[in-house]
Image (cartoon, helix red, strand yellow):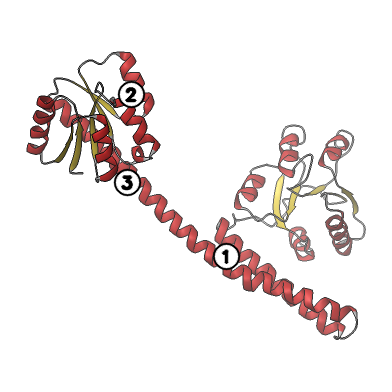
Amino acid sequence: MKRILIIEDEQNIRETLSDLLCLMGYDVLQASNGKEGLTLALEEPIDIILCDVNMPEMNGYEVLIALKNTDLLTYIPFIFLTARSTMGELRKGMDLGADDYLTKPITYESLEKALNAAKQKKYHIANQLNGLQNQLAEEKTKLEEVKEINAHGVRGKLALMQGMIPFIKTGKFPLDRGLNILEASGKEMDKSINQINMKVNGAKPEVNNKMEQGGSINSIWLIDDDLIQNWLAKTILHEVNPKWDIIGFSSAIKVLELLEKERPDLILLDINMPEMSGLEFLESITKTHPNLRVIMLSSSVSSSDIEKSLSYSQVINYWSKPLKENNIKELLNY
């Protein structure tokens, strides 16, 4: 940080200040009015600006506003020079974005203190910018990797599945082989989606996959606005245990009403639903039904959704859709 621009209409003050800064090791540019100073600030690389408040043609406030409109204030510390500094002037300058005020006559100590503070601010800004640039580069690399996975692992397999289905339907392709291809393609898509999630959200939080002791399972409520997902989950649960009493609900609000009268042994809960989300449902039962056992069954693989869900005491697990028979068996030690 070596180059300082002085914008000051009084020649004696400007040159005296310039000499002092040169002795302190700075490269100094001078401007005798606001317009000239603004031109230099826009054309030359400047590290700090020292600017008088009261000047003809363009005063210091106008220079500051003009620089702010060009986004230069993000990088250049701006210090006002003034012969008087009322609270109104100080407040006006700070509100416009000035970093400091120096009251004339300027002493070596006050100048050094102001410049050191300006250096610290610019150093902090530079570190922030470097951090943002590195983060942007990382996100750009991540985006390219996600695009690659999506193109080959998701869209490619989806195109294959869509292309195979008409041939399977018309019998032009053997059913068994066709189903095997669709199943394998689905697994590859699931793997690719998990890879994308890892790129975007990072690793999933660890989830305990064991039911704590505390009563048998006789009744299960499914809360999901997707009726097909409800049907699939209900079918899989009945495959595990035909004796379970399983009820599907498309509205979490309806379940809240029913909980006033009865309660299931286990709830499988979706996150993204209209009217009331799964997380809003959990918040609603936090105090009223602290002993309910809930398993999140969601298509969301966001780390934040998982962490937020597991923060509720009722949630004993978080599973990604579709429900898998092995999940249930492992959970209940079947």
Sequence-earlier tag: 1 or 3: 3
Q: Which mark is residue 126?
A: 3
Q: Amino acid at mark 3?
A: Ala
Instruction: Report the front residue among 129 and 317.
Output: 129
For discs 1 and 2, the disc positioned in front in the rendered view = 2
Q: Residue 21 appears at what percent x and percent y? A: 12, 35
Q: Quadrant of the C terminus?
A: bottom right
Q: Amino acid at mark 1?
A: Val
Cα separation, mark 2 vs mark 3, equals 23 Å
Q: Is residue 45 above or below residue 155?
A: above
Q: Quadrant of the N terminus?
A: top left
Q: Secondary structure at mark 3?
A: helix
Instruction: Report the front residue among 241 and 233.
Output: 233
Q: Residues within 10 Å of mark 1 (few under 14, many from 20)?
A: many
Q: Secondary structure at mark 1?
A: helix
Residue at numbered disc 1: 146
Cα separation, mark 1 vs mark 3, equals 30 Å
Sequence-earlier tag: 1 or 2: 2
Residue 223 vs residue 117: left or right? Answer: right
Q: Is residue 181 above or below residue 263?
A: below
Q: Residue 22 appears at what percent x and percent y? A: 9, 38
For discs 2 and 3, the disc positioned in front in the rendered view = 2
Q: Which mark is residue 93?
A: 2
Residue under the point 74% across and 44% down: 278
Callout 1 touching callout 2 (CB < 8 Å): no
Sequence-earlier tag: 2 or 3: 2
Q: Amino acid at mark 2?
A: Gly
The quadrant where residue 203 appears = bottom right
Q: Secondary structure at mark 2?
A: helix
Cα separation, mark 1 vs mark 2, equals 47 Å
